[in-house]
Image (tube, rainbow, N blue to C red):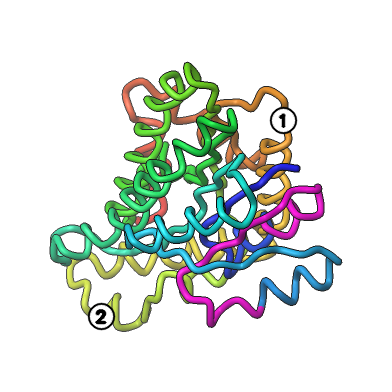
Amino acid sequence: MTITLITGTSTGIGLQVAVQAAAAGHTVVATMRDLGKADALRSAASDAGVTVDIRQLDVTDAASIAACIEATVAAHGAIDALINNAGSGHLGTIEQEGLDAVRDVMEVNFFGVVATTRAAMPHLRASKGRVLTVSSVGGIVGQPFNEAYCAAKFAVEGFMEALAPVAATVGVRVSLVEPGAVSSDFVANVGADVPAMVAAAGAYGPALAGYIARTTAAFSPAAAQTPAGAAAAIVELLLAETPAVRIQTSDAARAFVARKLADLDGSAVFTETIGWVS
């Protein structure tokens, strides 16, 4: 039976991956920074008739990572798969925020992935396992007011793409997962007070208001993929005998990524994304 450790499982995609992977027969170690937020996962697991092992793991804390991995191996004997899902959203533009804000975004979304992967690699090498990292279409296409977030996801993409052939030589398969818009409370997820942000944005205010209006609509349940749908694509990749290095979780995500990869001079992407803010 496969021992699968997942980060960031208190809500959204991570919660759904934990439940669906358990339903598919994996022994799931579902981790989150704050165990006080575990009730939603417990409830979803109970409703699905599955059991998950819920543990604390803060991807920005090396001691927390080490303790969780050590405890997982002690309890279950191995780690066969790591799913890096933990992350956080962020809105802002560089003229109006300090470098500490950018560093915080990088710490969670990039260095947290690197640190957790590094700690798990000896165990994954022993089990000939795999690493699945949830990135974003924002790791391929830079998006307005997501400079720090996209920088972190671009870094994740480069790191994992470079790691993949090296890890393969010791039997570990590395894959990237790129969701597009997934239905959520977009504004709540980034912790934004929209009126205050727009009022404080000065010359950028109209562009920010336009971006938030467009993106809130794009992330609405009527327009976006569900967390369960994105999770199903991840679990399918987890179960694949020969996993792809990169997948997108929806047709919309595939089309968006394909547009960038065919856009050698950047004009197509720029024309689209400037339309989001003008």
Instruction: Name the element at disc 2.
Output: helix
Which residue type carries mark 1?
Answer: Ala
Task: List x then y, in percent, for residue 59.
Answer: 39, 59
Q: How many marks?
A: 2
Q: Residue at x 41, y 31 (%)?
A: 268
Can you say which quadrant of the picture contains the C terminus? bottom left
Q: Quadrant of residue 248?
A: top right
Reply yes or no: does residue 108 show up in magenta.
no
Give the number of the disc on residue 218: none
In the displayed structure image, the side of residue 257 where residue 28 appears, left or right: right
Residue named by callout 2: 199
Image position of 39 (left or right of 116)? right
Residue 20 inside the magenta-drawn segment: yes
Q: Residues within 10 Å of mark 1 (few under 14, many from 20)?
A: few
For the residues carrying marks 1 and 2, which lies nearer the camera in this image? 1
Q: Please provide percent x and percent y for residue 167.
A: 45, 24
Q: Position of residue 129 (x, y in %)?
A: 59, 33
Residue drawn at point x = 32 percent, y = 23 percent: 265
Instruction: Name the quarter where the N terminus is drawn.
Output: top right
- Looking at the picture, tell me which residue is in the foreground, 272 or 115: 115
Q: Secondary structure at mark 1?
A: loop
Q: Are marks 1 and 2 in contact (CB under 8 Å)?
A: no
Disc 1 from disc 2: Cα separation: 48 Å
**Residue labelled with disc 1:** 240
Q: Residue at x 60, y 61 (%)?
A: 30
Q: Toward the viewer: 148 or 273?
A: 148
Task: Report the magenta residues as a range.
Answer: 18-39
Amino acid type at circle 2 is Ala
Mark found first going from the N terminus, 1 or 2: 2
Q: Quadrant of residue 80?
A: top right
Return the x and y of residue 191 as percentages of the image width and height: 40, 76
Q: Residue furthest right?
A: 49
